Amino acid sequence: MKEFESIVMGKSSIPALSITIILMIAMTVCFFIYWRVKNKQQTNISYLIAGIVGFMVSARVLELGVHYFCIIMDNPVSRFITGSTIAYVIYGVTMAGVFEECGRHIVLKYIMKKNRTRENAVLYGIGHGGIEILGVILPSIITCLVVAIMFTITNGPLDVALASLNITEETAAMALPTVKAAAAFDYGMMAMNVIERLFAMVLHISLTVIVFYGVVSGEKRYLPLAIALHMLMDTFAALYQRGAVPLWSAEVWAAFWTVVSAFIAVRLYRKMAER
């Protein structure tokens, strides 16, 4: 497994990964506790659960099902999408925007018909963004932490460390990105990951408020608006995955569209108080 020989586990990897896990859990819990305590009379836990279930069904079941055919499987469609950066970006941002925002719309309009308060819309967004952190992002970071700890504990020949992680010649290619990520994770990466998740949480809350306003007002333009904002938010992230832009530009781009989405959401949130 020569591809592993040049990897050196960073001294800050374990503390940085540990702090990242703690901060991400704390972020999710604090968002929920703060909003629930502040708006106990206007919120219902069912909206938090709806946000969790809505994300899991729309993004982790239905969207991933489409990805399996269009990206993972070997067929003419997947070869076309993965073979073209433009096609990959358009496909990726469209799927994310359509599935997540339509999922919000369906749940908020057809399932959650009671207690339609603006405060519950925010709680739904917290559930949506929170489960993405706890169910999607956190497991990969925990895996990196386990890898970093095992490499540090063995503190011996590389083959011993790899054996302790059950990495064989057959699984080496699959494990390599995780091992590299664990080795490169430092305090800078910690800050970037936490800030990125903070922006993502704000975005999910903002887009939920936008979709919710469209539901309670009956104005159809707000669902397409939410889809468009979501697609714009993800554009540079998809370009970064293809190596077309640097990471910093993707983060700046995401921050800009998060601010735009939050600005629109705050205006609509205040407007709902007047209804």
Image (cartoon, rainbow, N blue to C red):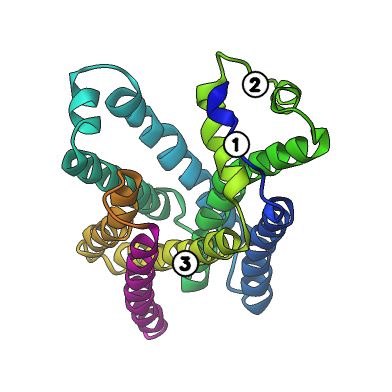
Q: Nearer the viewer, residue 66 or 46?
A: 66
Q: Residue at x 40, y 32 (%)?
A: 64
Mark 2 or mark 1, which is nearer the start of the sequence? 2
Q: Amino acid at mark 1?
A: Val
Mark 3–mark 1 Cα distance, whole angstroms, equals 27 Å
Q: Position of residue 179 (x, y in %)?
A: 60, 36
Q: Residues within 10 Å of mark 1 (few under 14, many from 20)?
A: many
Relative to 61, is 99 on the left or the right? left
Question: Could you tell me if the residues under marks 1 and 2 are in contact, i.e. CB atoms within 8 Å?
Answer: yes
Q: Residues within 10 Å of mark 3 (few under 14, many from 20)?
A: many
Q: Secondary structure at mark 2?
A: loop
Is residue 97 something that shows in the picture?
no
- The image quadrant that residue 43 belongs to is bottom right
The residue labelled by disc 2 is 167
In magenta, the rendered stretch is: 247-275
> Could you give the CA–CA distance between mark 3 and mark 2, rounded to whole angstroms?
35 Å
Q: Which mark is residue 179?
A: 1
**Disc 3 versus disc 2: nearer the observer:** 2
Tell me: residue 204, above or below residue 34: above
